[in-house]
Image: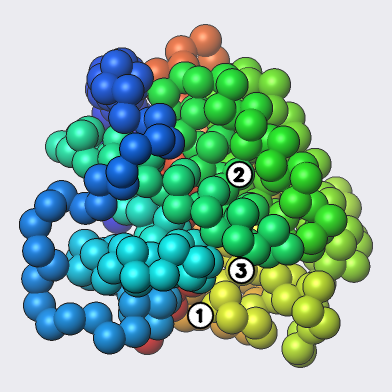
Amino acid sequence: MVSFEYDRVSRAVTHACRTVSILILAGASLLACGGDRGGTSGQPPAGEAVSNPIGAAYEALVAANHEALPQIIAALDESVARDPNDAASAFYAGVMRLWRLTRARPDRNRDLAQMALDARDAVALLETATALRPESEHAAAFLGIAQVGIGAFVGDEVRIEQGRQILDGAVPLNPAYVHGVRALVFGALPRAHPLFQQAIDGVRRSLEACGSVGGGEQGLTFAYAAGPLPSAQRVCNDSGIVAHVWEGLFLTFGDILVKQGEADKARAAYENAKASPAYDTWLLREPLEERIAQAGARADLYLDDDATNDPLTWMEEDRICVGCHASAY
């Protein structure tokens, strides 16, 4: 367990690393979407060939197998090269790069050149997937995630605004899902950013689309919706393809409320995660308990005048992807 005290001591150093990384990435000019995709590091993938790249991609996500990413990305790139109209392979090739970016983002020894290539390629691939399948809420949502997240990392407000427009436009495709994505991506923005205030709106609208009504003393206690749900509400519980989407939503909700300085409300939001019947197999049970215990102290750090000591939200950490998809077996 990483102690909260260590986290406080190291936050200033992390902030300095972030600043240097932003300057380097912005100067690299590799985020432009034109030109040939750089792919992975240029090294041949290790191990056996991947016969089903899309299946392998999702299996790696469910198993939290980050080490398999270079081989999987290379195989997906080959699929896209063979068939430029293969929207599914383009989508997964972009998403796997985003996963690699989220893993690298908090790492002080990160490969900034590789991150810049992954950022450029992820946007290009997700733009391709969205153009090929304009009816896909997943392609549009992940393109919005890429634009906002990359824009925030390099300080590009134009890119952030492009991502916001993409996400807002995708809401009618699946309100429950896209509003949840809006909460994730806007909640990761700095507290002072204008779009951060839309994060709570994203959570509330996602819950509304799921038909969930809050109760309890603060109106923040939600009943778990059991059983298979209609397609439009497949992200409203853990019965669909994503093993822990319910827990992920309320971890997001709590972190946003803490970031707003509302520790009591955050604790109530966090507690909802425990209502899932799959909670005991969730990988992030221990971090959730830490957040409940430390909500007041974390909120105080957001509210002080020192931005360098702000804790990372779950949306900014390196387990954002596996937090919903992977389970402890």
The type of residue carrying mark 3 is Val
Query: Residue 185 sits in which quadrant?
Result: top right
Q: Nearer the viewer, residue 153 or 244?
A: 153
Q: Residue at x 31, y 43 (%)?
A: 36
Expressed as whole percent of the image width and height from the top left, the position of residue 131 reads 61, 54
- Residue 53: tell me if it is visible: yes
Expressed as whole percent of the image width and height from the top left, the position of residue 210 reads 84, 67
Q: Which residue position holds label 3?
A: 245
| Secondary structure of the residue carrying numbered label 2 | helix
| Secondary structure of the residue carrying numbered label 3 | helix
Pair 1/2: label in front: 2
Pair 2/3: label in front: 2
Q: Residue at x 47, y 19 (%)?
A: 155
The type of residue carrying mark 2 is Gly
Asked if residue 36 is positioned above or below residue 248 in the image, the reply reads above
Q: Which residue position holds label 1?
A: 280
* 1 or 3: tag closer to the N-terminus: 3
Q: Which residue position holds label 2?
A: 144
What quarter of the picture does the C terminus occupy?
bottom left
